[in-house]
Image (cartoon, rainbow, N blue to C red):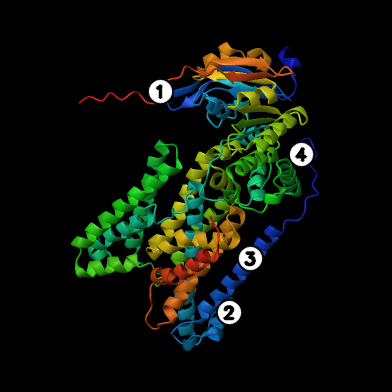
Amino acid sequence: MTAAPGTTVTGAAAPRPAGRWRLLVLLAAVVALGVLVVASVALGSSGVGFADAAWAIGARILGSDVTPDGERVQAVVWGLRLPRVVLAVLGGAALSVAGVVMQGMLRNPMVSPFTLGISSAAAFGASVVILFGGAASAGGRTDPLVVAGALIASAGCAALLLGLSWIRRAAAVTLILVGMALNYLFSAVTAALQYVATDQQLAQIVRWTFGSVNEADWTQVAVVGCVAAVAFPLVMARAGALDAVAFAGDDAARGLGVDVTGLRIVGSITAVALAAVVVSFTGVIAFVGLVGPHIARLIIGAGHRYLVPFAAVSGALLLLAADTVGRTVFAPVVIPVGIVVSFLGAPLFLNLVLARKRSFL
Amino acid sequence: MTRCDEPRGTLQVTGLRAGYGRTTVVHDVDLVARGGRVLGVLGPNGCGKSTLLRALCRIVKPTAGAVELDGVDLAGLHRRDLARAVAHVPQATAGAFSLPVAEAVLLGRIPHMGMRPTAIDHAHVDRALTMLDLDALAARRVDELSGGQQQRVGIARAIAQDPRVLLLDEPTSALDLRHRIDAMDLVHQLAHEAGLTVVVAVHDLDLAAGYCDEVAFMHAGHLLVQGTPAETFIPETIKRTYDVEVVVTSADDGTPQVRPVPTATRPLLPALRVTC
């Protein structure tokens, strides 16, 4: 502590290798995601391979004439694989970013859209529609009534979460405890609904809760894409504020000019909207929102300027890889992505954690 | 001295009242912290020192009174402008997440930078790391450091913030003697050489007497007295503040030295009365 405090500061700072390294890791992840997207579109049990998929995409874009067999290929690629792949990419990115935001702004590594009750509320909403929707509801993920039920319930949960927390000025602990209480409440009510459901309704509810992108369509892609397009820039613009709260605490963050209450409100709305929309279309995929951010942190570090984009890419990679494995390894049997992602992700996460001698948070 | 004669960086506090919810912790405090000087805030645990510091930089919104920096009411500043003018170092808080030291110090540049840090921001970080003797620890994670080293990271972050006023909440509480002296030397340098206004909450009276140009004694949220150590370090003031008897002597350079008077010996435990 000997340097003169009054030393003039100039811009002749050394280059920062850590920043360049992180950028390279981020670019590598984007390239890996691109490769996986291509592979995933080209893989499947219908006999449509890489060349066919490339032709189908080119023909649709260029507006070429299509033969009857070509129409089948177009239907497989544009109607089944592409929306599924894009929804997995957007959904994985959205859930992972939602987890990063929640964990960072609440300074708690155990927080996720699942632990704060959003997924349980969506499951509750879907269950209510399946149970009481009668003939109006087909009960599947593409059924607008089921989606609406899940969306309304998760939005209601989010409103309750924010409303109750607002009374305590969005204190981190209050948000977490309110979220956990709502999670248990919605889980209990859903369990009660399952108890009184018929066998067919019970099967539909259980099937809904196995998260899946099986029934993805372009409407779902458009909705998730629009929410993500608004939410991601909002989060990136607050990366510095998230750093201040996550690493220095509320007081120090306020001393650094951060509007901590405002950050929690905007962050909660953004994260909850991302999670609620995805879960309403896909069902419960708990792993990506909770562990996805930690996997990203292990690889690229905890600073949010790189963590947020990397978590988006790695979350997308994780969900798409799981879905691709789930629909190809035991084809024609399709295993829901909500199951496969935990089977693939848990060993990867444990390996990353155990390979480190020190904490990664 | 009239207000226009005050040196740059003068923090004028008038009738400041602050607290939490319906509980008022700081009651109608008037004080002046002058540019290029160190003001020590002294008082027992729970007397409102930390709350006073938090109210000065509006982390806690005052319920009455005003804080002016060179005649500008801080209540009228945007929070980012306020953070450029006043830096606050809270007592150490352990978090769930941690960063390398250099990146933790870079947080101090948040009020100055946009989306990405510039070379100027990194230069401020490098200077702060050097000043706090943290160069060798720059790549280490903050949670792997000792409590004292973490405290130095907090001070480095505030220096990287490049403020005119520095508020330090017990910055020496976790430091060993060497680093305690280093930290107070730095505080003294920051005020006298860099011209910062430094307000520091401290517990150690001798440290305050040695390093602070002025001290303010607080008790139960009230400011009892403000003045130079030579003016204020008198047994009566210390008795009113801490409820302890002391003898105050002067060192060769005139710095007051406080020595407690041993209280009458009393048993640590009440005598056991055994009845059969």
Q: How far apart, in angstroms, are the residues tagged by discs 1 and 4?
A: 48 Å
What residue is disc 4 on? A2
Q: How far apart, in angstroms, are the residues tagged by discs 4 and 3?
A: 38 Å
A129 left or right of B90 in image: left
Vertical placement of residue A188 versus A282, above or below: above
Say whether marks 2 and 4 touch (CB < 8 Å): no
The part of the image, by quadrant, that contains residue A338 is bottom left
In this rendering, the label closer to the viewer, 1 or 4: 1
What residue is disc 2 on? A58
Q: Amino acid at mark 2?
A: Gly
Q: Which mark is residue B267?
A: 1
Q: Are marks 4 and 3 on the same chain?
A: yes
B12 left or right of B20 in image: right
The part of the image, by quadrant, that contains residue A173 is top left
**Label 1 crowd (10 A; few <14 / some 14-19 / many >=20):** few
Q: Amino acid at mark 1?
A: Pro
Q: How far apart, in angstroms, are the residues tagged by discs 2 and 3?
A: 31 Å
Q: How far apart, in angstroms, are the residues tagged by discs 2 and 1?
A: 93 Å
Q: Are marks 3 and 1 on the same chain?
A: no
Q: Are marks 1 and 4 on the same chain?
A: no
Q: In what quadrant of the picture does the N terminus of chain A appear?
A: top right
Which residue does the image show at 47% across and 76% down from the upper left? A324
Considering only order in the chain, which callout, 4 or 2, is on the residue closer to the N terminus? Answer: 4
Q: Amino acid at mark 3?
A: Val
Horizontal and vertical percent for residue A109?
A: 47, 53
In this rendering, the label closer to the viewer, 2 or 4: 4
- Chain letter of the residue beneath label 1 in the structure image: B
Q: Which mark is residue A25?
A: 3
Q: Which mark is residue B178?
A: none
In terms of secondary structure, where does tag 1 sit?
loop
Q: Amino acid at mark 4?
A: Thr
- Chain letter of the residue beneath label 3 in the structure image: A
